[in-house]
Image (tube, rainbow, N blue to C red):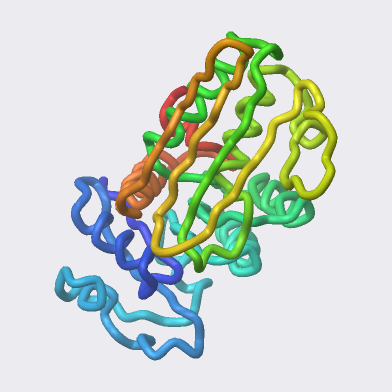
Amino acid sequence: MATRIGVVGAAGRMGQMLVREIAGTGGAIFAGGTESGSNSTLGKDPGEIAGIGPTNTRLSDDAAALFASCAVVIDFTVPAASLMHAKLAASAGKGLVIGTTGFSAEQERVIAEAATRAPIVKAPNMSLAVNLLMALTERVAASLGPDYDIEIFEIHHKHKIDAPSGTALGLGQAAARGRKVDFAANAVRARDGHTGPRREGTIGFSVARGGSEVGDHTVMFCGGADRLELTHKAHSRAGYATGAVRAALWLAGRPPGLYSMKDVLGL
């Protein structure tokens, strides 16, 4: 039986990609989309906005109705909206795929609570290749040990509102798991002025913002005699849509719980 999938923010750039991906994926049915109450696209067919023709649905601002009509909803919005959608998923007992980043610790707690009543996949990056990069990062960090300093560099377009990116932080967390150390205690997210020598075992971050860069991430393992770099370069957001729809299909019918793309991919 095909899985009915809805999209919140369906008229946005990422939302349109999701609509196209769902419509073109076997076993998936695009069941509808929402937008904010002030959006000029309300009442229009999201398929026509996305360039795939009519889907016989209309954009509304009623997220609760969307959850009622779907098995799984995909959310690439902003943290405040994602929290509302997590609560709706919990109330309806429906699946939710969250690709939003930039959550605070308290917001993470709210999502974890919602996941006790609904199946939720949450990942800092939905790209299948990026999640393989995270698995490799964890393995390399475990293999090379503390003699190699870890630095993570990322660049995104000038409109991105959080830094470091959720993906960069996810890579740092993967490295910390590999080293079996506490991520928060070892992450160095900014350097300025007279910082002194690097503290052994830290995981450093560098951030660049500009232009229309979709997103590049590099994990560097810097040793005394050599340097190993693991890099992913995104040329299109389409990879995020592919991963999100795959996660939605995997999530349908799962018991409540907070899942990751590692679960989806069986890593």
Looking at the image, which residue is at 26% across and 80% down? 45
Up-down relation of residue 201 to residue 48 (above or below): above
Which part of the image, by quadrant, shows the N terminus? Answer: top left
Question: Among all residues in the image, which is located at the extreme front?
Answer: 194
Q: Nearer the viewer, residue 88 or 8?
A: 8
Image coordinates of residue 126 in percent, x first then y, are 44, 44
Image coordinates of residue 160 in percent, x first then y, are 53, 63
Position of 38 compared to 174: left or right?
Answer: left
Image coordinates of residue 62 in percent, x first then y, are 49, 79
Can residue 96 be seen here? The reply is no
Can residue 6 be seen here? The reply is yes
Q: How many marks?
A: 0
Position of 133 compared to 102: left or right?
Answer: left
Quarter-wise, where is residue 57 in the image? bottom left
Q: Nearer the viewer, residue 12 or 120?
A: 12
Up-down relation of residue 161 to residue 192 (above or below): below
Up-down relation of residue 236 to residue 136 (above or below): below
Image coordinates of residue 55 in percent, x first then y, are 21, 72
Up-down relation of residue 141 to residue 93 (above or below): above
Q: Nearer the viewer, residue 10 or 3?
A: 10
Looking at the image, which residue is at 37% across and 34% down? 129
Looking at the image, which residue is at 39% across and 90% down? 40
Position of 16 compared to 69: left or right?
Answer: left
Looking at the image, which residue is at 45% across and 58% down? 73
Question: Among all residues in the image, which is located at the extreme left?
Answer: 53
